[in-house]
Image (cartoon, grey):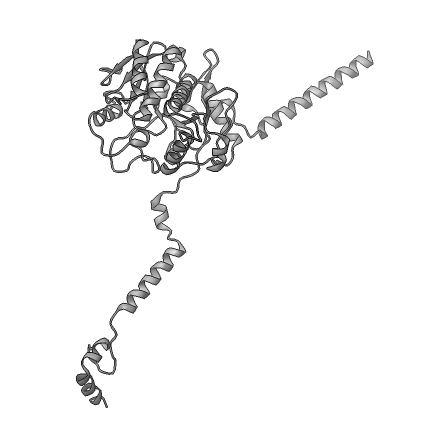
Amino acid sequence: MLAKAFVFLVQASCLVAYGYSFQINMRLSPFPSRSSIGSFNRASGHCNCAAATLGPSASFRNRHLSYPLRMSAVMEGEKNAVTTPVNNIKYLTKEEANQIDAELMSDDGGFSLSTLMELAGKSVADVIYDAYPPERIGKDKIVIVCGKGNNGGDGLVAARHLHYYGYDVEVVYPERAPREPFIGYVKQLKNLDVRVNMGMPGTANRLGLIVDAIFGFSYEAPLKAPWDLILKQLNSPDYFGGIPILSVDIPTGWDVEKGPPKDGSYFVSPDILVSLSAPKLCSTRFDGVHYLAGRFIPSRMQYKYKLNLPKYEGAKSFTMMPPPPPVVEEEEQAQEPSATGAQAAAAQSSAAEAAKPLVNPLLGLNAMVSSLPDQPAAAAAAAAAVP
């Protein structure tokens, strides 16, 4: 009996010590609790992302209440934010992005335009399946707005894959490129009975998501018809302003490097951004859910351009981006002039002083020294008059 009682006491003391240690570990754990990333529905496996926090740069509009992101997307973003304390990912300028595309499609790169658009469009469809799975959207439609350039081609490919994934897809394609592979993409959609229309739907009823695949790099202000009207409709609460938007690579209306315009012109404010191949500099000003897709850059190019891209898991064609580095506005830079700028200003001031005409103080006149050689007689008389 005494032996059994002793064993019981030892086991009880171990359990108490384990519980105390568990509480301490939970208090000291650097990982946030599940309650800090939004309300989680165990039955459906989804998260209310209106209250979610992926990091210091994440924010969501109220329209996410109706179509919250999957829990996996939120958890993936939180994991990257925790395990990547310093975001040293390369954010591309417009010139760098064009160089990478040109190198991929060069003889050494080996990619064709249609191959790149197929890979990019497939990855965009995979992101939509991850963020807004079919059982969540239900019978609501996905409207993909496509421009006539490569960004629009990505959208056409994404529409085909989304149809195979079980979504009700509709394409808005007002300006159509009269060349391949775009002609073939449209034929493929029509053979699948996917609607390819010239204008936006007449109503926002039964719309679950709008995909912005309009311009990308080719955007130039001001917008011309019909895009000026479409952009107003996307921003107006009377039309489609309350529908979640996913932008492909660069939101329409944004500068590739500077981000959204500040002159009051219309632009798309997406809830989700899918950067292709590598993030662009404008995405540092994006505060929504940021995916990276387009898993086709060779490792030698990543090393050459020092991209430092996040890793893709398994067979996934996308990954979550960590929060971007802080952005220093131009106004802040102007308030703190550099030392070289101050030196240049001082040098310019000295040069201006040196360029001023010199005056002889002995004469008491406003005669310039530079004019004395031209008037020797007047100069000699003036000098003789001085005591």
| Image vertical order of residue 144 relative to residue 379, above or below | above
Q: Can residue 348 be seen in this view?
A: yes
Q: In which quarter of the image is the C terminus?
A: bottom left
- Percent across and percent down for residue 87 are 48, 35
Camera-side residue of 55 and 297: 297
- Percent across and percent down for residue 198 are 22, 18
Q: In which quarter of the image is residue 7?
A: top right
Please name the residue shown 25% across and 79% down the image: 360
Q: Quadrant of the N terminus?
A: top right
Residue most toward the right?
2
Number of callouts: 0
Camera-side residue of 351 and 338: 351
| Image vertical order of residue 16 relative to residue 373, above or below | above
- Percent across and percent down for residue 263 are 25, 38
Residue most toward the front?
107
Camera-side residue of 292 and 377: 377
Q: With 355 as the anchor, is 41 left or right in this view?
A: right
Q: Can residue 243 be seen in this view?
A: no
Please name the residue shown 28% across and 30% down the image: 267
Q: Quadrant of residue 158?
A: top left
Q: Quadrant of residue 244?
A: top left
- Percent across and percent down for residue 153 are 33, 22
| Image vertical order of residue 101 relative to residue 373, above or below | above
Camera-side residue of 197 and 329: 197
Please name the residue shown 23% across and 75% down the image: 370
